[in-house]
Image: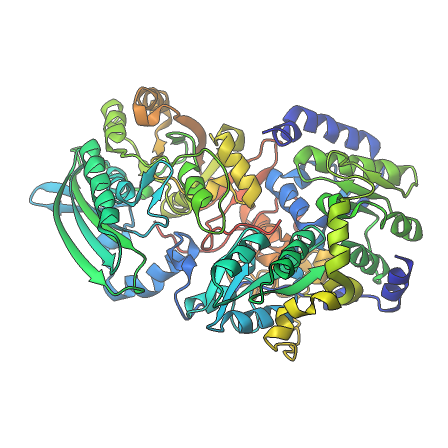
Amino acid sequence: MADLASAAAEAPVDPANWTCPAPLRDQPVVVMGHGGGGALSAELIQDVFAPAYGNPTLAAMGDSAVLHLGGTRLAFSTDSYVVRPLFFPGGSLGDLAVNGTVNDLAMSGARPACLSAAFVLEEGVELTVVDRVARAMGAAAEAAGVIVATGDTKVVEAGHGDGVYVTTAGVGLVPEGVDIRPQRARPGDAVIVSGPIGLHGVAIMSVREGLEFGVEVASDTAPLADLVAAMLAVTPDIHVLRDPTRGGLAASLNEIARASGTGVRLRERAIPVPEAVVNACGFLGLDPLYVANEGRLVAFVPPARAEAVLAAMRAHPQGGGATLIGECVADHPGMVVVATGLGGTRVVDLPLGEQLPRIC
Amino acid sequence: MKYIDEFNDPELARRLFDEIRATVTRPWALMEVCGGQTHSIIRHGIDQLLPEEVELIHGPGCPVCVTPLEVIDKALEIAARPEVIFCSFGDMLRVPGTDRDLFRVKGEGGDVRVVYSPLDALQLARQNPGRQVVFFAIGFETTAPANAMAVHQARRLGLDNFSLLVSHVRVPPAIEAIMTAPECRVQGFLAAGHVCSVMGTAEYPDLAERHRVPIVVTGFEPLDILEGIRRAVHQLERGEHRVDNAYPRAVRETGNPAALRMLEEVFEVADRSWRGIGRIPASGWRLSDAFRAFDAEHRFDVEGIRTEEPAVCRAGEVLQGLIKPTECSAFGTTCTPRTPLGATMVSNEGACAAYYLYRRLNGQTSPAAPAPQGSRAPQEEMNPVG
């Protein structure tokens, strides 16, 4: 060490010349982060899609659009499913393709009615694989109380796809007196999550090529429309619902805070994170708040109705772990702030793009 | 989880905060060396809860941040080749080179894969004999042994399609460089616990003695960090400067002998450039002559790539605690979290982003307004997506 020390002493480092790298923000090509549900996804919508075909309905940016058609309010939503691997602990692409769209509809308070299913199949994929995906969709549709009313199939050449992609769209009717959208969050609202977070993302990561690690975690994929109906039965005046999929709870809460111009304050110790998720996230250097869920919702509820809604949720199979995790505030509009277990605070930002396992 | 929950206990944390408060009588500046410690400090808000006399200066122990531009450019060049499967720890993918990052190379058709271990990259090499598999071997003493092991196994298996792009760095020479820098304000170090779990503590007594600084080997959970701070403050108040191991459940004085043997066999100490800091003598490793055939720089003939580091911001001075972020003329004007000039305005752990946020949280409008130490998390200006 002594020789190292003297060598360094001869060439002192001048901190005035220290600099730091900044991530590139302007990407001329599509990168994975554009699909991550974070800031890059938002830029794609803002810079490309909104100028091309923006309209007031699209600008509402709910999980589903609500259209006034023939005297009814119709919820309409679409989503593409490109998960790898196709089958994972607790579910499959087929489960996600149904539950994901059903849940997007439910987040406007709608009762989902029917779905479309469009398959993009890669040449060479075994038909038994397609069959397993289709059967999973059938079972999930039955469980969610929807029918698959129409469909389409395309095949791309080998190497031009990743096995099976599924796109579903769905419609449902929004009940009278229900107005659920992110803009309705109000200071004072109770912020409730329907159960433990992070299970889907950790289940997928645990089986992804190059990252395999041993955890007994199953995806939480599940339809939430029935839970939402149970909540609306005790109070139609639910302000906001969101299912925190890509980008996790952090992305959903940031989107709500920004859409409504309110702040969100969470109590870290109240947020239900299963031990296996804590461990996996610790190991990979991820924050459970940013990990995807496929069978959870977060609700903003008037404070006077919070206990009743919590009780209704806990009485439902999909809401047994419902927990009050914080509240909507007038301070720091557009921001989500967490009170840490030790008594400090930190801001939980919108993720930039994909969450990446840290080196250390 | 065993060894996590126990080190998060709020009641025990409160007692440690109380002890630190009871011990401290005057201002002290401590540097936590490792980015993982910085992350934990910010994540749990520890800096907000310390007595104001104790200032934490965030050290250069973030391997992703200090990997030099030149090495990133070499990685980008190699990763773009059609025959290459380029494997990396995930967080290197968004670190910018001169004009692009690994995400961009991937977007343009490069085969870039995130792996969690170099042994996974080795496995890919075995499964893809027709491709060249390159692992981006960056990091401190913590990641080096596993990378050494991967090369060692590649040689044993006779794999000629596996190589490492090496940019390993070592902590002690960085501490030396910080302490010999003009205007150094650091009075005590929280040494990086995981680095010491590999290397042991033998490299540190000489540094502590010559620079008269306490060096406390410190872990990463909140109670670990508070205990490290408590011991460092205790030494400083008594005028002591010893190496103290506050992370004994992971660190032995002798380190990890198997890892040390592997390092000894595969790597040799070399000068290294640190991004944003400059060249520090003997501050890293390269593959030893016996393993030179596995050096990706050599195999892909990128040794000639030379990149000058642009001087863009004063982040280095901020990192040393020499200036407050608000004293930089770019702060809040040309440099914001939305348009950052440096990593300190980008990262969760960045002091500049924290100050920017603090100003916004408190409704201040002048970028030059002095901000007290405190809340340190960043927030972007962003149009809502929902």
**Residue at 58% from the left image edge and 38% from the top image edge:** A345
Front position in the image: A135 or B331: A135
Give the image quarter of residue A234: top left
Q: Is residue B175 left or right of residue B78?
A: right
Q: Is residue A48 left or right of residue A215?
A: left
Q: Where residue B41 sits in the image (x, y, percent)?
A: 65, 42
Do we see residue B262 in this rendering?
A: yes
Front position in the image: A86 or A31: A86
Figure check: A163 above or below A191: below
Q: Is residue A331 left or right of residue A234?
A: right
Q: Where residue B33 sits in the image (x, y, percent)?
A: 73, 50
Q: Is residue A121 left or right of residue B364?
A: left
Do we see residue B369 in this rendering?
A: no
Front position in the image: B380 or B221: B221
Give the image quarter of residue B252: top right
Figure check: B299 above or below B166: below
Q: Where residue A68 sits in the image (x, y, percent)?
A: 13, 46
Q: How many marks?
A: 0
User: The N terminus of chain B is located in which quarter?
Assistant: top right
The color scheme shown is rainbow
**Residue at 87% from the left image edge and 66% from the top image edge:** A7
Q: Where residue A174 sits in the image (x, y, percent)?
A: 17, 37
